[in-house]
Image (cartoon, rainbow, N blue to C red):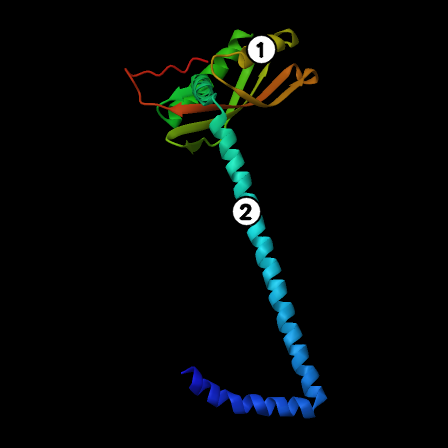
Amino acid sequence: MFERLHKILYPHWLQLQQQTAANPRLRWMLWGVLYIFLLYVALSLGEWRAEQQQAISQLQRTAQKLEQLESQTEWPERLVAEQQTGKQLSERLWKAPSAGLAEADLQNYLREQIINYSGEGFRLRLAPTETLILGEQTLFKVTAEISALIQTTQIDALTKSLSEGKRTLVVERFSYSPQRSGQFGLLVTAYFLAVEEVAGAVDATP
């Protein structure tokens, strides 16, 4: 096979040698093509080596991180701490079996708070309740804007009672206008954890 290929190509090789010997331009052009080809091969090899070196460095960094993680011994303590934090946050959430009852619970709570601190002219407006899905849990986001007439001496006690309640209540806006006969206003948000109704009642006491 190689002898046959040699017989076919050899005459062409001799013809090429004769042409290059007789034509200097053709000879320089062939040398230029060869130079470009070798340069291309060298650049390709350089890029390949750089990519391989980068991949090796990345694998080394990953291996070092894995070794550091493996050497850490506080994972059980971290898991327990995260579980305790999650439980504490869950206990701070309000609870209701439906969005309608969540709105009613928040409305009743805010009205009681205003009455307890000698407020008058209580008004409340609810924003559309949002249903949030977090993992396997469903939350109701209830936002209410309230206003009432309250004496200045009662404001600190009222705001402290709202912030230190058993259930988390986020105060998004606060306003007070002594010029308008002590007009007090709040925009608050409560997050209710959707739970099944047990014995006809749900503990939503803040």
Instruction: Depth check: give the residue in front, 191 or 18.
Output: 18
Would you name the residue on which mark 2 appears?
A: 56
Q: Considering only vertical position in the picture, is 82 above or below 3?
A: above
Q: Position of residue 136 (x, y in %)?
A: 37, 31
Element under label 1?
helix
Amino acid identity at mark 1: Lys
Q: Position of residue 73 (x, y in %)?
A: 47, 22
Residue at (40% x, 24% y) in the render: 193
| Outermost residue, front side | 3
Quarter in which the N terminus is drawn: bottom left
Would you name the residue on which mark 1 appears?
A: 160
Element under label 2?
helix
Q: Considering only vertical position in the picture, is 33 above or below 12?
A: above
Q: Which mark is residue 63?
A: none
Gap in angstroms between the C-alphas marked 1 and 2: 59 Å
Q: Position of residue 115 (x, y in %)?
A: 52, 10
Residue 152: image quadrant is top right
Instruction: Depth check: give the residue in front, 186 or 29.
Output: 29
Is residue 194 found left or right of 153 in the rendered image?
left
Residue at (42% x, 28% y) in the render: 139
Q: Position of residue 117 (x, y in %)?
A: 55, 8
| Outermost residue, left side | 199
Is residue 31 found left or right of 92 in the rendered image?
right
Q: Considering only vertical position in the picture, is 194 above or below 54?
A: above
Q: Nearer the viewer, mark 1 or mark 2?
A: 2
Residue at (43% x, 82% y) in the render: 2
Q: Considering only vertical position in the picture, is 37 above or below 52?
A: below
Amino acid identity at mark 2: Ile
Instruction: Depth check: give the residue in front, 181 or 204.
Output: 204
* Neighbours of disc 2 within 10 Å: few (<14), some (14-19), many (20+): few
Whichever of labels 1 and 2 marks the residue nearer the N terminus, that label is 2
